[in-house]
């Protein structure tokens, strides 16, 4: 089946630093990738949708200057948390859609971010 | 606005039992519905996807049904095993193509 990878799986950083998370579709091309955030014992919250070669579409309440998304190729999207603060600590999960439109979404293993 | 509700929020059963997880959604205009499994601290694993034109899908001991008109889906797990312990998430894809997730059911299978 289709595989989505994320790197790193764990990151601890100091407050004020920026952190970049990579999401790759390993064996398929993804025209659309999604970034989610998940707090403990809660469901996934969609942060933004990114289409290859164009600007990401952010959900209401998500700061686009805080969470920079780049989707430079059909197999790679990156999320950069700029000037991270402790409240940004969370589990970030990316997802890639196999086909345009209503194809199945495959999810990465997640990246746990802890900001001290 | 589409809303997805999963009942119960948590379920604990002895090994070997058959069980049903429920998912309901408020807007029947969906493209498909997907059931996922999430282990603690891990990402999501897709279990079953049911297109809007389908009534059910089966994979091994798992069977998912979809009744679009009533806004309901069930995930049936046969002969449960301790390895089935996880959080099960239901998600629907409405016409704007963004998955809407339920809160999940935390399942514990006791040996």
Image (tube, coloured by chain):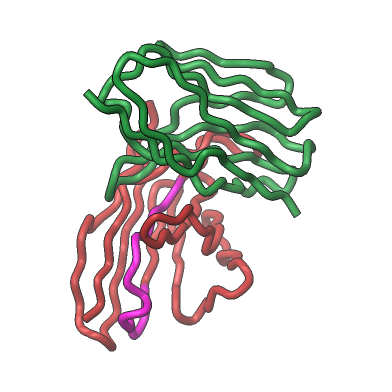
Chain colours: A red, B green
Q: Which residues are magenta?
A: A81-95
Question: From the image, which quarter does the C terminus of chain A lie in?
Answer: bottom left
- When the figure is inspected, residue A61 is found, relative to residue A92, above or below; the finding is below
Residue A54, given in percent of the width and then of the height, sits at 57, 62
Which residue occupies 46% across, 21% down?
B19
Picture quadrant where residue A27 is located: top left
Residue A97 part of the magenta segment: no
Against A38, residue A114 (above or below) is: below
Residue depicted at x 55% and y 32%: B34
For this rendering, which residue is in front, B87 or A73? B87
For image coordinates 28% across by 46% down, the residue present is B40
Image-based side of A112 in relation to B94, left or right: left
Instruction: Reply yes or no: does residue A91 show up in magenta.
Output: yes
Residue displayed at 60% across by 46% down: B99
Image vertical order of residue B25 relative to residue A51, above or below: above
For the N terminus of chain A, the image quarter is: top left
Q: Nearer the viewer, residue A42 or A56?
A: A42
Specify the quadrant of the image occupied by residue A67.
bottom left
- Give above or below for A71 relative to B73: below
- The percent position of residue A26, horizontal first and vertical second, equals 33, 39
Residue B53 horizontal side relative to residue A90, left or right: right
Coordinates of residue B85 in the picture (x, y in percent) = 31, 32
Figure disc tally: 0
Residue B83 located left or right of residue B19: left
Q: Position of residue A31 (x, y in %)?
A: 53, 46
Q: Relative to residue A38, is residue A10 drawn left or right?
A: left
């Amino acid at each position: 089946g289709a595989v989505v990878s994320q790197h790193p799986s764990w990151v601890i950083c100091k407050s004020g630093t920026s952190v970049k998370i990579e999401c790759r579709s390993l064996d398929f091309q993804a025209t659309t990738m999604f970034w989610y955030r998940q707090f403990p014992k809660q469901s996934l919250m969609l942060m933004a949708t990114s289409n290859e070669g164009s600007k990401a579409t952010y959900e209401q309440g998500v700061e686009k200057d805080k969470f920079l998304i780049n989707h430079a190729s059909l197999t790679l999207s990156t999320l950069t948390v700029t000037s991270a603060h402790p409240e940004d600590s969370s589990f970030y999960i990316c997802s890639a859609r196999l086909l345009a439109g209503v194809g199945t979404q495959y999810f990465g293993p997640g990246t746990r971010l802890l900001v001290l | 606005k589409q809303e997805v509700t999963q009942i119960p929020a948590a379920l604990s059963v002895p090994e070997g039992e058959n069980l049903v997880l429920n998912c309901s959604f408020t807007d029947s205009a969906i493209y498909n519905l997907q059931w996922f499994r999430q282990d603690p601290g891990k990402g999501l694993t897709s279990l079953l996807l049911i297109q809007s034109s389908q009534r059910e899908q089966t994979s091994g001991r798992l069977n998912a049904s979809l009744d679009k008109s009533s806004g309901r889906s069930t995930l049936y797990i046969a002969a449960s095993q301790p390895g089935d312990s996880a959080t099960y998430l239901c998600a629907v894809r409405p016409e704007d193509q963004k998955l809407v997730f339920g809160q999940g059911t935390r399942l514990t299978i006791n040996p």
